[in-house]
Image (spheres, rainbow, N blue to C red):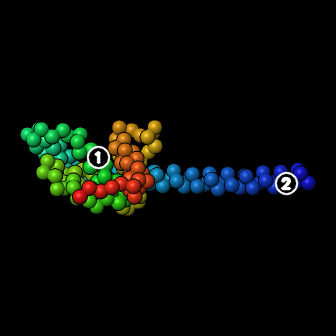
Amino acid sequence: MDKAVRLILCVREIKLLKKVYKSCKFLAIMKILQIIVFLIIKLLLLPLSIIGYIVFVFKIMVYGKKRDIPVTSTNPLFAHWILHKFRLRKDEDGAKIISSLPFISGAGFWLMMEPSIIANRICGYIPSLAKIHEPEKASIASFDNCKTEFFDKIMEKNINRIDYLY
């Protein structure tokens, strides 16, 4: 009887492993398709992306230098905008702030990111810039997203204990 039970469990494990393998294979194919869709969109919109990048960098460098504003001071805002646009974090106000700052070209930033956003809407593509990794696995590009997530968790945990000053 003991051998029969082990055999049944072994067969169940094999069936489960087959399902997991098929699922992983499906996910790998989906990831490849997402990248292909993104590359097609990126190639089609490459001239607009380049123009957006030039306008964005020029405005932030020139205006920021005139006003003595460090370029890196806006990185958390960009993280909020990116996470919001890729539907990883709801933050209407953070997205609006980016466009209202005088030293940031909202149109340039939008044109620069538009191929990724379109690919996200079509097939769920998420660039590494918009992913939220564990802090140990974060890259330089996704580090601000980790910080944003970290502070969001702190705020959620402590929001009811904070005294507001008016």
Question: In the depicted view, which residue is nearer to us: 98 or 157?
Answer: 157
Q: Amino acid at mark 1?
A: Pro
* Residue, disc 2: 5
- Tell me the kind of residue under disc 2: Val
Q: Which residue is mark 1?
A: 76
Q: Quarter of the image containing the N terminus?
A: bottom right
Q: Quadrant of the C terminus?
A: bottom left
Task: Point out the residue furthest to the right here.
Answer: 1
At numbered mark 2, what does the secondary structure look like: helix, strand or loop? helix
Percent of width and height locating residue 135: 43, 40
Residue 60 quadrant: top left
Residue drawn where x is 40% and y is 58% of the image: 160
Report x, y in % for residue 116. 32, 53
Q: Residue at x 75, y 55 (%)?
A: 12
- Foreground pick, 66 / 109: 66
Does any portion of residue 12 appear in the rendered image?
Answer: yes
Lateral position of residue 35 relative to residue 48, left or right:
right
